Image (spheres, grey):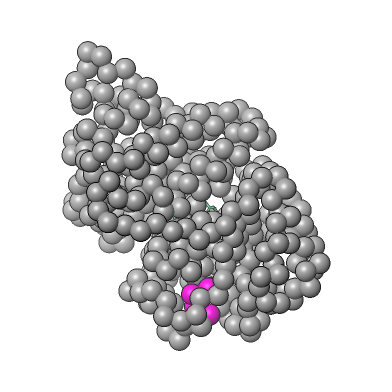
Amino acid sequence: MLGNFSYCNPTRLYFGEDSLNFLNDELPKYGKNIVLIYGSGSIKKNGIYDAVMDILKKNNKDVAEISGVMPNPSLDKLYEGIDIARKHSTDLLLAVGGGSVCDYAKAVAVSINCDEDPWDKYFIRFEEPNCEIVPVACVLTMVGTGSEMNAGSVITNTATKQKIGHVFKSSDVMPRFSILNPRYTMTLPYYQMVSGIYDIFNHICEQYFSGEDDNVSDYISEALMRSVVHSSRIAIKDPQDYEARSNIMWAATWALNTLIDRGKTTDWMVHMLGQAVGGYTNATHGMTLAAVSLPYYRHILPYGLAKFKRFAINVWNVDPSGKDDTQIAEEGLAALESWMKELKLVMNISELGADDSMLEGLADVTLPMPGGYKQLDRAEIIEIFRESL
Ligand code: NZQ
Ligand code: ZN
């Protein structure tokens, strides 16, 4: 392990079919005023809203609500939520939903007691909060982002078409606790399920495709990737398979909860490209990643050949005999591609609403990251978007 680092993850997880009961253990630790945050209504249809409300009432909490948090939460919605949370003198922000709802709760949490504009401070200048951060907790209903156990928050400024993520350094931004009931994910539409599965897989890739040293993080990553591929193949045939869905849920958390990037630089370029597409099209996060991944990975393969070869052999069981390194590495990417097609992921950005006329604009909002095998220049970014059309 190279480098110097510390490791602490303060989020307490409750996992399993009965995990919501633990809300009763957690709620007494916080004051009376709870803000319940959720999306556009799935939790009302599937009964999760009633189950959570019941526990909040039994614990004598005074509940205000922020509803209608959209996928890719917007800055305007953030301002609205800050206002509600301030008026309610919030003691705990309880997010019930997917990554969007959880990310949004964190953005509210760092803004309630902040005098500055949160967009400029946190998403343009990437500053840390210097105010009191209101505690966040999460009841997860959609699997993929890892937001339930990390300090990331992604907000979209629809006026400027900028979708920007800030991974806060302060661990106080992380949820204090998260409740992970795999059953809650069973009502997800197929499109969201596979989008989340690819999001998980790509989070692992973003941390795996970097560095040349022998690092335990890469071995953990390979195991997680194999598990995600295995369980996904079961879940697409039978989305109600609890074992597969629970494995996917647990893998998602470990894919992006600060563990597997220890001692490494990380890439995150697929996310930068995907977020640019998201800012322009408001497309589903995991699909934006799927649509740009292969052109990007084929582009950087020569610069990270040894790792792409290892990926082919250790994740996809490519038989190396009689082949040179490039052939092996390319077979690994071909195996990735055919798995993505099995899942029926969106494989190009035009299907998500992007077109030729957007290429320059997409490049304008794409942040080139330095931690992967090749830092892209503007021409390369445009070329990769063009190949993704
Ligand atoms: O609005 P509701 O009714 O909740 O419906 C949601 C939404 O339409 C629906 N859904 C969620 N749980 C459901 C359900 N429908 C039926 N049954 C259920 N149990 O699914 C749709 C998508 O939800 P969303 O929360 O948007 O999905 P996801 O979890 O993929 O979150 C995406 C957001 O997270 C950000 C993305 O950029 C995007 O804004 N990310 C956050 C990260 C982090 N915090 O570290 C990292 C990721 O890379 C990502 O960037
Ligand atoms: Zn992601």
Q: Is residue 249 left or right of residue 316?
A: right
Residue at 18% from the left image edge and 35% from the top image edge: 302
The verdict on residue 246 being magenta is: no
| Residue farthest along the top direction in this orientation | 322
Residue at 54% from the left image edge and 56% from the top image edge: 148
Region in magenta: 108-112
Question: Which SS type dominates the magenta stretch?
Answer: loop
| Residue farthest along the bottom direction in this orientation | 115
Above or below: residue 71 compared with residue 130: above
For the image, the number of numbered tags is 0
Above or below: residue 349 compared with residue 37: above
Residue 377 visible in this rendered orientation of the protein: yes
> Residue 253 location, x and y as percent?
51, 48
Q: Pick the residue in front: 132 or 339.
A: 132
Q: Is residue 357 left or right of residue 99?
A: left
Q: Is residue 218 left or right of residue 346?
A: left
> Residue 295 location, x and y as percent?
29, 39
Residue at 77% from the left image edge and 57% from the top image edge: 51
Residue at 31% from the left image edge and 17% from the top image edge: 319
> Residue 206 location, x and y as percent?
34, 46
Q: Pick the residue in front: 246 or 105.
A: 246
The verdict on residue 110 being magenta is: yes
Residue 199 visible in this rendered orientation of the protein: no
> Residue 388 location, x and y as percent?
33, 42
